[in-house]
Image: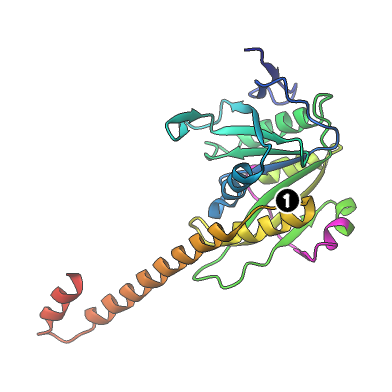
Amino acid sequence: MVKKEYICDKGKRSSVVIDDLSVEIKKDATLILGFAGIGLLGPIIANSLIEQIPDIKEIGFVTSEFLPPISVFYEGILKHPFRLLYSLQYNLIIGICEVPFQISSAYSDLAKTLCNWALSEDVRATTLVIFQGIPQVGLIEKYPVYYAAEEEMMNFLEKFDLKRFEKGIIIGAEATILNEALTNRLNAFALFTPVLEIPTPEGAASIIEVLNKIYGLEIDTTKLIEQGKEIKAKMLELAQKTQQYQKQQQLPHGKEGEYTQYFQ
């Protein structure tokens, strides 16, 4: 199989490998990157897009010396942990990284490699999108979506009733890639929503609804919202059991039978 590998002069420890050269990427594509950060927003969003965009096609993968020794597989089929897919219909490139990088020093190398490929003559992308969760404690009732963007993108994003995130920081691979985009021709923006420290599918659903509006997608988020309700119900159940246990601990001596009943 004929492949093409892209190695950036400044990011020599990572590379982009395109193993389906039959797919021609249209000019002005948008690169959407989903990383395994808090709340797992990136992989949840990217997987939903991959599952529901009709013409999506896997075109290659990203290699890096800094990827952890982890393999992933679906229905018994081995997959690279950092894959690239493309939809001609929507002119979207989806990058999904399902494992965290081992060290933060990998981010700069990866950012240079990805941006170099996105700007190459074979791709000529113009927009970069990343996601990041806003950590919350306890149950989350609403999942508003905020944005932070280069100044040139702000008027465009305001059309979709997004709330501007006034001040804050972005961390991880997403931050380094955004910083790299600030030095080149890619127009970058980030979408935020509240998340828990566990997978937060309802937050992912809120961001997907925004992507539906921006890019004319038709991604159904019903399943994600149901998953979120299930997670919330389990958290409530756990919280109630914890409260019951704490009350049992405060009972006077001679109530051991009630302890036994609780743990049965």
Kindly identify the residue that appears in the image at 27 percent across and 82 percent down. Answer: 247
Kindly identify the residue that appears in the image at 39 percent across and 66 percent down. Answer: 234
- Measuring from the top left, give residue 4's x and y in whole percent: 70, 17
Kindly identify the residue that appears in the image at 50 percent across and 71 percent down. Answer: 139
Query: Does residue 134 appear in this view?
Result: no
- Measuring from the top left, give residue 188's x and y in whole percent: 79, 46
Query: Does residue 96 appear in this view?
Result: yes
Q: Which residues are magenta?
A: 156-173
Residue 162 lies in the magenta-colored region: yes
89 shown above or below 259: above
Q: In this view of the protein, which residue sits in the foreground, 58 or 84?
A: 58
Quadrant containing the C terminus in the rendered view: bottom left
The residue singled out by tag 1 in the image is: 217
Kindly identify the residue that appears in the image at 50 percent across and 55 percent down. Answer: 199
Q: In this view of the protein, which residue sits in the foreground, 85 or 7?
A: 85
251 shown above or below 113: below
35 shown above or below 121: below
